[in-house]
Image (tube, grey):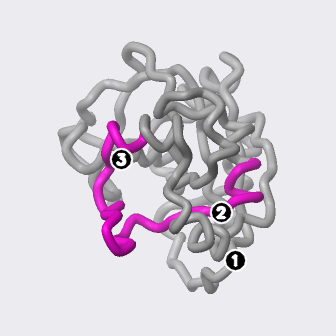
């Protein structure tokens, strides 16, 4: 999550992609865990709005600074997204596209409605060409079958849907080089183009 008083320009729980990308670079991130009296293990919309207005508590800011993102790169096409994911860089996606709260038999959801919301893309699949989107709202906001060991609360979107997101002017940023997070060996052969 984003942690910065300076990043609270919108006074809500939504986020502008460019501001959020700069904020994680300048002010850092927090992991979903307990920090003394602050339990961040579950998404809390009221807390998001409150921290969007007031900033996160002062005691958490030095902890967030331990986990800075060193590199942000704007992603502007499906091809850019494929390259970022296959090189191990997750992508934030900030847009007004809403999605159906159910997945089809292959784990995909389709655009429905409008959300001013930020999520992230963390995988690519080749059997049905698409990207895995993870939402912050927890595991129960969406139902339906999952595919390829996708996490709870996530859904796949097709390359065509991501192309539409780019043509609507949504902001996407690839992030890399986290401080204090050691690289891990991850078997991505099931999810990405080799």
Q: Quadrant of the C terminus?
A: bottom right
* Image coords of residue 34 (percent x, y): 34, 71
Identify whether 147 is placed above or below 141.
Answer: below
In this picture, residue 106 sits left or right of residue 145: right
Residue pointed to by mark 1: 179
Residue 77 visible in this rendered orientation of the protein: yes
How far separated are the C-alphas under marks 1 and 2? 9 Å
Residue 3 shows which numbered tag? none
Secondary structure of the residue carrying numbered label 3 = strand
Residue pointed to by mark 3: 154
Q: Which residues are magenta?
A: 22-48
Secondary structure of the residue carrying numbered label 1 = loop
In this picture, residue 13 sits left or right of residue 43: right
How far separated are the C-alphas under marks 3 and 2? 24 Å
Label 3: how many residues lie within 10 Å, few (<14), some (14-19) or many (20+)? many
Q: Choose between 145 and 98: the one closer to the eye.
A: 98
Labelled pair 1, 2 in contact (Cβ < 8 Å): yes
Q: From the viewer's perspective, is the residue at label 3 or at label 2 nearer?
A: 2
Which quarter of the picture shows residue 179? bottom right
Question: Looking at the image, which residue is at 37% across and 44% down?
Answer: 47
Secondary structure of the residue carrying numbered label 2 = loop
Labelled pair 3, 2 in contact (Cβ < 8 Å): no
Residue pointed to by mark 2: 28
Question: Looking at the image, which residue is at 74% across and 35% down?
Answer: 77
Q: Choose between 71 and 126: the one closer to the eye.
A: 71
């Amino acid at each position: 999550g984003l942690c910065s008083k300076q990043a609270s320009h919108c006074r809500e729980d939504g986020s502008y992609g460019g501001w959020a990308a700069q904020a994680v670079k300048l002010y850092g991130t927090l992991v979903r865990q307990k920090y003394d009296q602050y339990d961040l293990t579950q998404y809390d919309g009221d807390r998001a709005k409150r921290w969007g207005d007031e900033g996160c508590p002062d005691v958490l800011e030095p902890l967030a600074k331990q986990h800075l993102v060193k590199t942000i790169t704007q992603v502007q096409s499906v091809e850019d997204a494929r390259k970022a994911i296959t090189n191990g860089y997750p992508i934030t996606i900030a847009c007004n596209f809403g999605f159906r709260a159910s997945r089809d038999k292959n784990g995909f959801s389709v655009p429905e409605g409008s959300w001013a919301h930020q999520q992230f893309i963390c995988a690519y699949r080749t059997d049905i060409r698409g990207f895995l989107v993870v939402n912050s709202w927890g595991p129960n906001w969406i139902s339906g079958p999952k595919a390829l060991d996708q996490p709870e609360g996530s859904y796949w979107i097709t390359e065509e849907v991501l192309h539409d997101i780019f043509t609507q002017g949504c902001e996407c940023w690839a992030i890399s080089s986290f401080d204090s997070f050691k690289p891990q060996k991850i078997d991505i052969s099931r999810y990405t183009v080799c």
